[in-house]
Each structure stands twice: as C-alpha cells, then as structure tokens.
Amino acid sequence: MTVAPARWTVEERTRPSPGRLAADLRAGLASRPVTIPPKWFYDEKGSALFDAITHLPEYYPTRTEEAILRAHADELPQVQALVELGAGYSRKTRLLLEALTRGDRPLLFVPLDVAVEPLRDAAERITADFPTVTVHGVVADFDEELTPLPGTPGERLVAFLGSTIGNLTPGPRAAFLARLHRATAPGDWFLLGADLVKDTDRLVRAYDDAAGLTAEFNKNVLHVLARELDADLDADDFDHVAVYDTEHDRIEMRLRARRALSVPVRALGLVWELAEGEEVLTETSAKFRLEGLRQELAEAGFDVVETWTDTARDFSLTLARRRHQQRADGYVASHESQGEP
Ligand code: SAH
Ligand code: AVI
C-alpha cells in the first residue's frame, strides 16, 4: 500500500498565549484611552463572528473586494507561491487560487494567521479542492518578523486582503511594511486590499450593524480576557461604540463601561478600575485615499503596478512589486546591499 504524502502542514511560529495577552493588556492599561490590540478578537468564536459579519448587508468590504478579485484575478502574475497574511478562512482567496493554478500549474499556498482554527479549516478544504496546491500554513503574528517567508524568493505573491492593513495605525503600518520588505526579495509581488474613504453614515453602519453581530464581535474580546487572564468581566457591563474619526480617516471601535467598575484581573495581580462612561479602544480601521496608499507603499520599497476599484470606488485592490534596490527613503536592506553603502 502506498501512502500519499500529506499536502498540508501547519507550522506554529507563535501561538496567542495568555502570557502575550497579559503583556498586551498591561501595556494597554497604561495608555489613554485604554487600548487592547485587535488581534485578540480572533479566538474560535471571534473568527466565526467575523466570518458572519462578512455576510451582513451593511458590511460592504468583503463582497466588494470579492467582486474586484473576480474581475481581475486573471491579470495577476503567475508565481510559484501565494502567501496570504491574516488569511482567516481564505474564502476570497479561492479566486486567486483558481487563477494561479489554471492549466494545472503547481502552487505553494502559505496562509499565515494568529488564529489556528480557520487556518486548519482552510488548509483542509483547499487541499481537497485544489489538487495542484500544497498548503504550508503558518501560525504567526504579523506584528513580528515575517522571515523566513516560505516560497521561492522573487517568485512569490504576498496577499493582504480585507483591509486588515487598516487595523494598523500609521506608525505600526510603516513598521509592518518595513518587515514585509525585509522578508521579501526583489521581484516578489504584493497584493493589498484596502477600504476607501466614503460617506460617514455608511461607514458607521458597517461597524454597528442592525443585527448586533459587530457588537458581539467587539465584546468577544471581553470573553477572551475573562477566560485567558481570569478577569471578572461581564460583557453586559459594556456598550459597543463605533465612531468615525474624520481627522484620521478611521473607524474606532470602543467598549464603553455602563457603570463604574472594579475588575479583578487575577493573572496580572491587579484590579482594573473603570469610570462610568469610560471607553476602551479595541480597534481602529483606517479608510484610505489611493494617493496616500501609493506613497506609503513607495516609501516602503514597493512600486504600484496596478490599482483596481469597484465602480463606486468603495474598495481598492493594489498590485505592487518589491523594488529591486533602494527604498524611496534611500534605505537599503543589509542582505541586498553590495559594496559601498
Ligand atoms: N483575510 C480575511 C480575514 C480578515 S479578518 C478576509 O479578508 O476576510 C483578519 C484576520 O487577520 C483574522 O483571521 C485574524 O486572526 C488575523 N490577524 C489579526 N491580527 C493578526 C496579527 N497580528 N498577526 C496575524 N494574523 C492576524
Ligand atoms: C479584519 N478587519 C479588516 C475588519 C475591519 O473592517 O476593520 C474587522 C472588523 N471589525 C469590525 N467589523 C469588522
């Protein structure tokens, strides 16, 4: 009997552990407003809630990006590997996989995410449905170094879909792009989905839906804190708040305390005091302007090759290429600098 080699593996580089959450909460308690990084939404329940949000009538980004992908996937370069950052269930990615494996081309698919469950789910389904795809899942935090990036240098397409880049504020976003530059090689491609600035009411409705799913998603972080850090938190003590900040072009999701609270967080050995009405910042979701996006990419060493949008210009998909030598600011990554600096 011959046993076929497994066509999917999952490599664990990091795991979202209580120790990491404790460190993030400790840092977040010291800032004003108190801030909890959005990566902590995505336990098994949070990942499923986000998936449900993508089907809501108010949440236009997913279906709009999907339509753009459907229209333009065939224009993408043929590559040896597709790396997907913050992949989740990789549902829209199937359109990319179809285009990149046409004619039975072999492809390495590398979904990378902090959330383990959707990664395994996607790896199994994609292996079953795409016979020429080998899946190498990576459990990792894109807030940390991305090296080594699987695949053949110069022959990879790195996709970052869903406007997850918007969940990084400008400083961390530039740091992320610098990490991506370090992890990629000249000639690698970057496909970036980014939500665009639009009517404020539509934006707020997308983050405060009538069915209350986004509120549940937001409050899920309280359940994660309670479970992982032994915190006496009751989600009913908080209201979901979504506001649009026109100065910074971003949605802010917050949790507002309905009354003054003293919350023991046993894993941290402290009591978290919240005033009535105090708001905890759980996510920022930036909305972009195409020129600004192009500039951020150029400064990080990625040249925009194509930008596609839907006709209403609600959402954008940008294809960029890792520059061969220097970044726009003159920085040269050490592994590619030759001779004199
Ligand atoms: N790409 C999918 C899912 C977007 S949801 C889509 O477009 O619909 C955001 C995804 O990013 C989640 O799966 C979440 O677990 C992941 N994520 C959030 N912060 C992360 C981080 N710091 N490192 C790695 N993955 C992260
Ligand atoms: C994953 N990320 C891009 C989503 C967003 O729109 O910022 C997360 C989300 N938050 C509320 N709804 C969806």
Image (tube, rainbow, N blue to C red):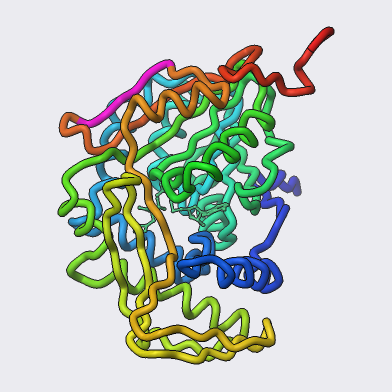
Q: Residue at x 61, y 21 (%)?
A: 155
* Residue 17 covered by magenta stretch: no
Nearer to the camera, 106 or 181: 181
- State the quadrant of the C terminus: top right
Q: Is residue 78 visible from the viewing direction of this image? A: no
**Image check: 65 left or right of 339?**
left
What range is drawn magenta here?
305-310
Q: Residue at x 45, y 90 (%)?
A: 261
Where in the figure is residue 292, as x and y percent of width and height?
38, 29
Q: Is residue 305 visible from the viewing direction of this image? A: yes
Q: Main secondary structure of the magenta part?
A: strand
**Image check: 300 left or right of 266?**
left
**Image check: 71 left or right of 119?**
left
Name above or below for residue 281 compared with residue 248. Answer: below
**Image check: 334 left or right of 305?**
right
Instruction: Please tell me in which quadrant of the rendered image residue 117 appears.
Output: bottom right
